[in-house]
Image: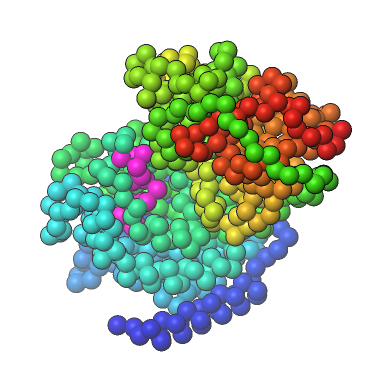
């Protein structure tokens, strides 16, 4: 057993060594380049599949990989020894090879510069002259928690029932290995250089066994598996989930091509991964390599392994060009005593958690749409102007309109577009700003009495100026979405200052993460909790915990340059706002939720 003192000393030596390597070998000022990284469990060196090693070689060639993390490199015993078929593959390819020990190895088309002290990773030099890190791991195969949870006998693993037991068993099985891996991985990630981690983790991902996946019947219970969570906590991202964030629609199973999906003695899952980190590194594509088009993107027959492999294509550049943030605009405000608003009706949303969104219907008179915050079912409520919920023809008033194929992670606002759709914003991002699944749902605006509807479109997005997840800046939470000029706009809730940032959604590609466009910034003197635009896009209402703003744009999108009205308020529970003609309707999280009506004329003109 290694002492605490020796681990600490190793960590300090490794950090110093990594820093020196980065200073001496990093290349700057060159264009971006593609790198394809693959993870591949050979299945006893390719021998267990009863195919010649050339068939295993063909898998790597079909994937067009540049870097390959190999697991189970040892072939069947011959003459008293197990051959290292990883080395044989390197010789057949004419590539570089690093034997990591324990029948794992790294193949590299690129020159190898050095390796970490315990050989969890190597540093390679890319064609541009940049250096990058490649780590590879094969974690303990047993006990295997999916089998334990499903009462499938395997390696004397005890049967378990709960998520907590699964996490405990996973930590016992793989925790020491993961700790040693993370000790060498962390200093490399800290350099900001490109870092890749491949591996057969013999454990599903915490991004796959989610409450949403459990509700869809894809896993028996939601489990936050600790091994993938540990590498994510040091800054690594899962390339497959970066490209395919929807874990229900894209399970990406790699275990196993040798049994049927309905085999009662097996359980198919995604346990082979390509993770990445580094400034200027972006996952462009991710493909599964396997035995059939039903289960893989790249197909080889016969397929020689019991694991499907994964290959990810990255664009590697210098640190991503920083987004030029416009200056924070502001306007001088008069000295005014905050106004205490009086509710005109109670918002009678059942199963009240927090009514956090509100928008006026563009189809039905005297109807507003609202919803609860995180923790509620995926549903919206048709609210009459007097606060009453419209009865549902299927479920009754207490159930609202359920949205099939949606999940309420942290719904914060709702908007209406000019095509008869509603847009539900699942972008609450906590104080840590650590979510990677921020998204918007489009649904057809239903009749107020309909009991169910379904998602038309789900769009994932990210902020162009958020360079770290979690973010130390803490300006990437949002509670305000609105539609204007054919686009969706988002206003953020800053925690580092009193302003807000305006973003526009320009791309709505499905199944990928779309990058927002930064438009403008304004000092709202408080955290933004809601927004709405008039149908013509000229007027923008913004709600904060300290007041109400009304902006009149003279040019498209120039809300913060035009006329400004303002009203300071005492209600620090105000959560949502919508424009209704010459009035503003505000909902607040008080009691069962209250509705307030504020005539636009009540706001003070602070800039004509």
Q: On the image, which quarter does residue 259 sit in?
A: top left
Q: Nearest the camera: 517 or 407?
A: 407
Residue 111 image point, x, y percent:
55, 66
Q: Position of residue 101 (x, y in %)?
A: 34, 71
Percent x, y for residue 345? 53, 26
Magenta stretch: includes residue 607? no
Q: Is residue 321 visible?
A: no
Report the quarter where the N terminus lies. bottom left
Q: In the depicted view, which residue is nearer to us: 554 or 240?
A: 554
On the picture, is 457 further left or further right than 79? right
Outermost residue toward the right in this view? 608
For image coordinates 55% across by 36% down, the residue present is: 588
Q: Is residue 239 above or below residue 126?
A: above
Left or right relative to 487: residue 375: left
Image quarter where the C terminus lies is top right
Front-most of 84 and 575? 575
Total of numbered circles in the picture? 0
Task: Magenta stretch: give its range.
Answer: 199-214
Residue 175 location (% of width, % of height): 32, 67
* Above or below: residue 126 compared with residue 562: below
**At x 60% / y 29%, what residue is drawn?**
596
Q: Residue at x 32, y 70 (%)?
A: 176
* Render colour scheme: rainbow
Q: Main secondary structure of the magenta part?
A: loop
Let me know if residue 497 appears in the view: yes
Residue at image coords 43%, 68%: 182
């Amino acid at each position: 057993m290694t002492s605490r003192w020796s681990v600490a000393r190793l960590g300090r030596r490794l950090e110093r060594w990594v820093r020196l390597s980065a200073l001496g070998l990093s290349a700057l000022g060159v264009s971006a380049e593609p790198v394809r990284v693959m993870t591949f469990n050979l299945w006893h060196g390719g021998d267990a599949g009863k195919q010649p090693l050339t068939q295993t070689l063909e898998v790597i060639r079909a994937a067009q990989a540049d870097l390959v993390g190999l697991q189970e490199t040892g072939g069947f015993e011959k003459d008293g020894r197990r051959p290292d078929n990883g080395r044989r593959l390197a010789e057949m390819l004419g590539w570089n090879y690093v034997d990591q020990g324990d029948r794992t190895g790294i193949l590299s088309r690129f020159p190898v510069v050095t390796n970490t002290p315990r050989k969890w990773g190597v540093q390679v030099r890319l064609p541009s002259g940049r250096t990058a890190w490649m780590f590879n791991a094969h974690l303990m195969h047993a006990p295997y928690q999916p089998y334990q949870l499903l009462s499938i006998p395997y390696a004397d693993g005890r049967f378990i029932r709960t998520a907590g037991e699964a996490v405990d068993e996973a930590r016992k099985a793989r925790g020491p290995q993961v700790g040693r891996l993370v000790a060498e991985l962390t200093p490399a990630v800290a350099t900001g250089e490109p870092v890749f981690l491949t591996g057969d983790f013999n454990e599903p991902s915490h991004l796959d066994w989610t409450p949403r996946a459990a509700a869809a019947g894809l896993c028996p219970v939601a489990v936050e598996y600790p091994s993938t969570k540990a590498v994510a906590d040091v800054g690594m991202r899962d390339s497959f989930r970066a490209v395919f964030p929807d874990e229900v629609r894209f399970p990406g199973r790699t275990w196993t091509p040798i049994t049927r999906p309905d085999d009662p003695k097996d359980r198919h899952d995604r346990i082979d991964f390509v993770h990445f980190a580094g400034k200027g590194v972006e996952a462009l594509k991710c493909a599964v390599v396997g035995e059939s088009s039903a289960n893989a993107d790249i197909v080889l027959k016969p397929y020689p392994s019991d694991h499907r492999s994964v290959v990810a294509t990255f664009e590697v550049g210098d640190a991503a060009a920083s987004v030029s943030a416009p200056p924070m605009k502001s306007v001088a405000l008069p000295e005014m005593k905050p106004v205490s608003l009086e509710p005109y009706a109670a918002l009678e949303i059942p199963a009240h958690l927090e009514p956090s969104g509100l928008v006026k219907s563009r189809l039905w008179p005297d109807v507003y749409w609202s919803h609860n915050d995180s923790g509620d079912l995926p549903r919206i409520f048709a609210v009459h102007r007097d606060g009453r919920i419209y009865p549902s023809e299927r479920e009754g008033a207490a159930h609202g309109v359920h949205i099939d194929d949606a999940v309420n992670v942290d719904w914060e606002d709702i908007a209406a577009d000019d095509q008869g759709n509603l847009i539900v914003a699942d972008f609450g991002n906590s104080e840590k700003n650590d979510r990677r699944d921020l998204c918007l749902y489009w649904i057809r605006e239903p009749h107020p009495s309909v009991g169910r509807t379904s998602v038309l479109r789900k769009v994932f997005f990210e902020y162009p100026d958020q360079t770290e997840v979690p973010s130390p800046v803490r300006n990437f939470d949002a509670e305000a979405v609105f539609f204007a000029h054919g686009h969706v706009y988002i206003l953020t809730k800053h925690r580092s200052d009193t302003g807000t940032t305006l973003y526009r959604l320009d791309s709505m590609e499905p199944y990928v993460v779309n990058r927002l466009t930064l438009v403008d910034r304004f000092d709202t003197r408080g955290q933004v909790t809601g927004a709405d635009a008039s149908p013509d896009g000229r007027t923008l209402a913004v709600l904060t915990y300290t007041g109400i703003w009304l902006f009149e744009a003279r040019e498209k999108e120039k809300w913060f340059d035009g006329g400004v009205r303002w009203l300071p308020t005492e209600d620090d529970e105000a959560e949502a706002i919508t424009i209704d003609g010459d009035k503003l309707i505000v909902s607040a999280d008080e009691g069962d939720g209250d509705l307030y009506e504020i005539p636009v004329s009540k706001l003070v003109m602070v800039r004509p």
